[in-house]
Amino acid sequence: MKPFQRGASTLDLLIAFGFSMTLFLLLFPSIYLTLERATKAQSLKNGVAQVTQASDIWYGKEIMRTRCLTLQQPLTIHTLMNEKLVDRQIQTLDWSFTVTTVDSTNNPLWQRPLRIVTTVTIPDESLRIAMQQALSPTKTTDSTLIFETAIQSDINNTLAIMDRSTGCLQ
């Protein structure tokens, strides 16, 4: 046998390359799925934050426009889109947003919103479970994640000049 055989190093490289490619093909789908879910979770988190912030801004504008703490028109995702506070591309094929408010019930004459409820409907169950684990929704149902946030408003200074029977400024 000769001390140097032709093609021996090429064969070693081919075996190493074949092993590397097999390992890559086995691991790539799970790595890709993990990165895709992490990207979607961040996108959903940003979307919920954007809707919440836009709702706060919209409510502040409504108070200034109507001079009332009560809502004159309901808060919806389409209202936020029409006011250009939320990008229309927030509604994707993977999920859809709805937004409402929870009103105070301690005053029988008028009610002001206390919390913003952002509901994200995710039809794909595996994606919903992954998003539920990555984010921390307030509540969950079969196909939705529900996020509740308090409305940031300081009305202590306005209570003195407010008509307590209507909830509007005098």
Image (spheres, helix red, strand yellow):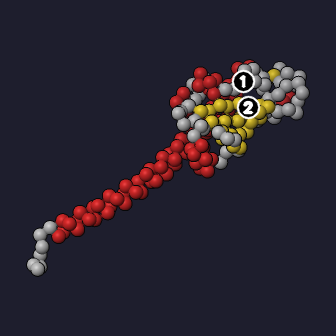
Instruction: Identify the residue position indicated by label 1 in the image.
Output: 74
Mark 2: which amino acid?
A: Thr
Residue at point 29%, 61% (across, down): 18
* Image location of residue 86, percent across then percent down: 58, 29
**Considering the numbered disc 1 on the image, is that residue within a helix, a strand or a loop?**
loop
Q: Quadrant of residue 143?
A: top right
Residue at point 40%, 57% (across, down): 26
Q: Is residue 148 above or below residue 103?
A: below
* Image location of residue 149, percent across then percent down: 71, 40
Q: Is residue 115 left or right of residue 37?
A: right
Q: CA distance from mark 1 to mark 2?
A: 8 Å
Residue 107's tag is none
The numbered mark, 1 or 2, whose residue comes first in the sequence reads 1
Residue at point 52%, 47% (across, down): 37
Q: Quadrant of residue 127?
A: top right
Mark 1: which amino acid?
A: Pro
Are discs 1 and 2 less than 8 Å apart at CB? yes
Number of marks in the image?
2
Q: Quadrant of residue 52?
A: top right
Instruction: Identify the residue position indicated by label 2 in the image.
Output: 101
From this viewpoint, is residue 30 visible?
A: yes
Quadrant where the N terminus lies?
A: bottom left
- Between residue 1 and residue 48, name the one nearer to us: 1
Residue that lies at the very extreme toward the left in this rendered image: 2
